[in-house]
Image (cartoon, rainbow, N blue to C red):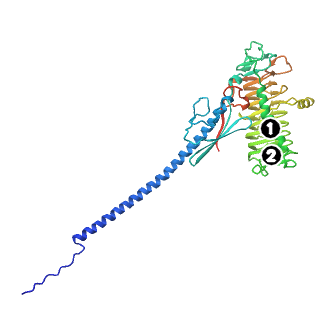
Amino acid sequence: MRSLKRPFVDPPTAYSKTATTSHESGAALLTVLSVLAILLVIVDFFVYRNVGRFKTVRLEIDKAQAYYLAESGIAWQLYLESLPKDSIPKDSLADNFENEDEADTLVFRLSPKLEHPSITVGSSISFLEIFSEGKQGEQSHALFGQFGLSPNDSLYGAALTLTDRQIPLKVPSLQSIQGAIRSGIAPEGGLKADPLPEEFSLLPILESLEKNHCGALRSTLKDRLLTERPYSGNARFTPSNPPPLSAEKDIVYNLGSISLQNMAHEIWVLRGPGRLFADADIRVRGNIRLENIELFAGGNVIFEDSISGENITAYAGGALVIADKSHLSLQGAAEKEIQLRQRAQTGIRSLLYLCKESARDSLKQKKEKLVPAIRLDGESVARGVVVASGPQSRIVLATADNRIEGIALTDGEFWSWGQVYGSVLARILRCGADVTKNCLGGGSLNWFARPRDLVLPLEFAPEQGRVSYKLMLWKSQ
């Protein structure tokens, strides 16, 4: 038999059907995994990006919520302060309280789901200060508001109020007084005046001012002069040798005087908080600006040569003198005399208060022929509130180019050859030696020209009824 030779047959190669199918499956898996990886990278990128955005948005929302919580705290406290004392709610902050009184400075709604703000109330002698801190999540915001009283037209809405009930009013012309007149006795010369109510009295306001200003400031000076660690001698501070307020809030010279002086062209800004005490005089001279500084002197306090400043407290056991184009916003009190001269000015939030003289001081001043007075001379302008306490005291506008913009109040005499843009409340008006009539001299009173941003000290609040507050200062802490 013939043997058959079978051709050689190669084994299956990579191009066989089975091998081709396996290769295509592996390529597809690799493609899917690659696409998934790319998608995961893209998703992770957007998630990471958006999570950052969400966190930023959440932080901004919390910041805004904390701010409005702090604002709500001030509004709530302001509402409480405006109520009569016998109607204040016992709860410090009511849940879901809604305040929509149009007379209030702020309007707010507070949800019970939110954390209540922390509220602190204080005063800078005559004005209400409210500190409120709101917290939301990890964010917090603190706000500070300072408020004064809105002028009450029922008390200060007349150009002139005379409390004396025996001496009639006489003015040179009807144009001298623009606004209503209230008098304890009918005026002469065809003038019309509203009768003064029998219960009307300036004494409660003056007594409150005397206690909170002269009494409190006088006690503060006396206490600090008895400190155990006073400085000796006299002090002369300059820009190169400033008072060490950063280390010590109270600097006391109980047997000397204090001088702040800067004769350079560059302004020297002295920022507080800080208090300077001297048994003798305190003199501030030169190109200086004071901010949040309190000055207490057993002698005189003198500002001269273009001094400027905000939020200043000054007490003088002698005279308080503001001169030489100085422009200050201050709460000032003096025992003997207050002078504004040589184009001096005070800001609209200022209070100048001449203390009521004691019996001992009265005898001493009679011997020295001194009359306790607030005097404006040399084109000076007193803005805000000017008060002279005591039946022997005076407020004097010496010439026609002097002006009071605000309220002048005294239970003594008001002498005016200048202008008043606002209201005068006085026992009598004087213009000369004749004491049988009230007279206005060459001055004028204009209630309609009063400053629109005028605020009053807390002592001017009515004894009954709600109190209206007016915003003076608002800032984040």
Looking at the image, residue 476 lies above or below residue 200: below
How far across and down, in percent of the image, does residue 347 sit? Answer: 72, 35
Image x and y of residue 11, in percent? 21, 78
Q: Which residue is mark 1?
A: 217
Quadrant including the C terminus = top right
Outermost residue on the right side: it is 367
- On the question of residue 378 being in view, the answer is no
Q: Are marks 2 and 1 in contact (CB under 8 Å)?
A: no
Label 2 SS: strand
Furthest toward the left, the residue is 1
Q: Is residue 329 left or right of residue 15?
A: right
Image position, residue 165 (x, y; %): 80, 17
Residue at point 75% right, 32% down?
A: 382
The foreground one among 175 and 359 is: 359
> What number is the disc on residue 171?
none
Identity of the amino acid at label 1? Leu
Q: Is residue 448 left or right of residue 43?
A: right
**Which residue in the protein does label 2 denote?**
261
Secondary structure at badge 1 equals helix
* Label 1 crowd bin: few (<14), some (14–19), many (20+), radius 10 Å: many
Which residue corresponds to the image point at 74% horizontal and 20% vertical from the top-left? 176
297 vs 69, left or right, is right
Question: Whole-Å distance between the Cαs marked 2 and 1?
Answer: 24 Å
Q: Quadrant of the N terminus?
A: bottom left
